[in-house]
Amino acid sequence: MPVVTGRMTAAEFLRLPEDPDRIRYELARGEVVVSPSPNLDHAFCNTNLIVLLVPHVRDQKLGVIIPDTDTYFGPEDVRRPDIMFFSTARAHFVGEQYLEGPPDLAIEILSPSNKHVDRGDKFKLYRDSGVIYYWLFDPMLKTVEGYRLDGNEYVPTIMAKDSDRVRIPPFEDLEINLAEIWRPARS
């Protein structure tokens, strides 16, 4: 369960030192939010997605994939999507110390302690900030949902589960075998 502490602006928040080990700070509506580190299901999903996406984006010269980095969404919001994609056209948002604007794609991987935030607050923030694509991976239920911004609303582009093979915008040319994303069952 995230813990909320004192209020500050994004400019003040971005001057803080790096997070201590196993603690994650974000700024949500002017309040510092402290979250626990992700669980193993989350970590496996995150790693497997990065291993899949980075070579695809690099080889196709589409832009850059960046994991878990402070991202400026507004004067009171600095969030850290689990994985982000910035197209070449929007790479100017990749600053020296933090990401200076929203990505083209934000990917969140659900954990028991954060699923309500990723489906609620972050869903609204990313939509209202103009994040064109939003993916939600749930490694506990082994599901993925994809959304695309249409006007001012997110519309679903895909809902899949288990070992489905999917193509999710903006990477329609990349087939993702979901069975390779989830944490392997313990034997």
Image: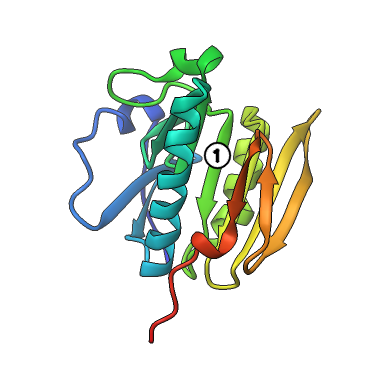
Is 6 displayed left or right of 152 in the figure?
left
> Splitting the image into 4 quarters, where does residue 138 fall?
bottom right
Whether residue 77 is visible, yes or no, is: no
Residue 108 horizontal/vertical position (percent): 52, 50
Q: What residue type is labelled 1?
A: Ala
Give the residue displayed 28% in from the left and 23% down from the top: 97
x and y, in percent, of residue 77 in the image: 48, 35
Q: Observer-nearest residue: 10 or 113?
A: 113
121 and 106: which is toward the camera: 106
Judged from the image, the secondary structure of the residue bearing numbered disc 1 is strand
Q: Quadrant of residue 179?
A: bottom right
**Residue 125, position as x, y percentages in the image:** 60, 39
**4 to the left or right of 151:** left
Residue extending farthest to the bottom is 187
Is residue 11 visible in the rendered image? The answer is yes
Identify the residue at image location x=62%, y=66%. Answer: 163
**Residue 116's spot in the image, x, y percent?**
58, 62
Q: Label 1 belongs to which residue?
A: 106
State whether residue 170 is above or below residue 36: above
Using the image, determine if residue 116 lies above or below residue 47: below
In which quadrant is the N terminus drawn?
bottom left
Q: In this view, does 37 lie to the left or right of 116?
A: left
